[in-house]
Amino acid sequence: MHARTYLLLVVFSFASIVYVFGEFIEELKGYHPEDRRVDAIVVLSGGSGRADLGLELFRKGRGSVLILSGVNRDADVDSIFLTELAEFERLSVILEKNSKSTFENAVEARRLLTEKKLRSMLLVTSPYHMKRAHYIFERLIPPDIEMALYPVPSPEFKTDWWRGRGLFAAFVEFAKYNWYYLRFSLQNPV
């Protein structure tokens, strides 16, 4: 091949990635909180405001169980929440400490939902993380468990997301989402 052909191939590849990334961003902007009552609110740890929003939704009666997935092994409810929990609230909060990734969050959530015979869940995570999390959870959570989505407002991904850390966070999620898409396309995930 000639240098010109290589150059055209590189330009076409770059343009394709930019286009697909733009489509990915548009999908991220399309997630909106679903106002539903569920059996369990599943909060994925790792982002600011997620646990607090999960507790707020729980206190509003949006779910009977609050599962915080992927929390630090040394964590307890008092180290996670700034406000004090009532005893009945403490009994309904599950700190899942085994998972270290979104994939493992879904595996552990599936285990807990199945064990406790919970039939619906609200997935709470940051908007830039929602597409990948939703994709993974859809493949691992049994189809008879209904799933609703609730993106948490995130300082990294606001209207001007392309400034500061937002662009980096979005691109990292784009890469991870495509890796999981390829992984699930090539093999059974579990």
Image: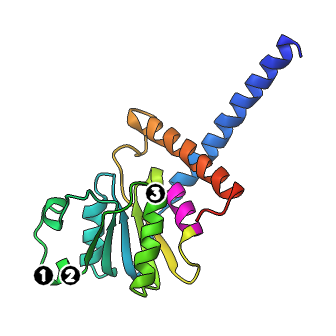
Say how many tags the image has. 3
Does the CB distance between marks 2 and 1 fall below 8 Å? Answer: yes
Q: Amino acid at mark 3?
A: Thr
Question: Which residue reaches farthest right?
Answer: 1
Q: Which residues are magenta?
A: 131-139
> Which quadrant of the view contains residue 166?
top left
State how far apart marks 2 and 1 are (Cα). Answer: 6 Å
Q: Is residue 137 magenta?
A: yes
- Identify the residue at image location x=43%, y=54%: 101
Residue 100 picture location, percent across and down: 39, 55
Q: Mark 1: few, some, or many residues within 10 Å (few <14, many ≥20)?
A: few
Q: Residue at x 20, y 60 (%)?
A: 75
Q: Name the residue type under label 2.
A: Leu
Label 1, on which residue? 87
Looking at the image, can residue 58 be seen?
A: yes
Circle 2 residue: 91
x then y, percent, for residue 16: 72, 35
Q: Is residue 142 left or right of residue 113?
A: right
Left or right for 118, reference 13: left
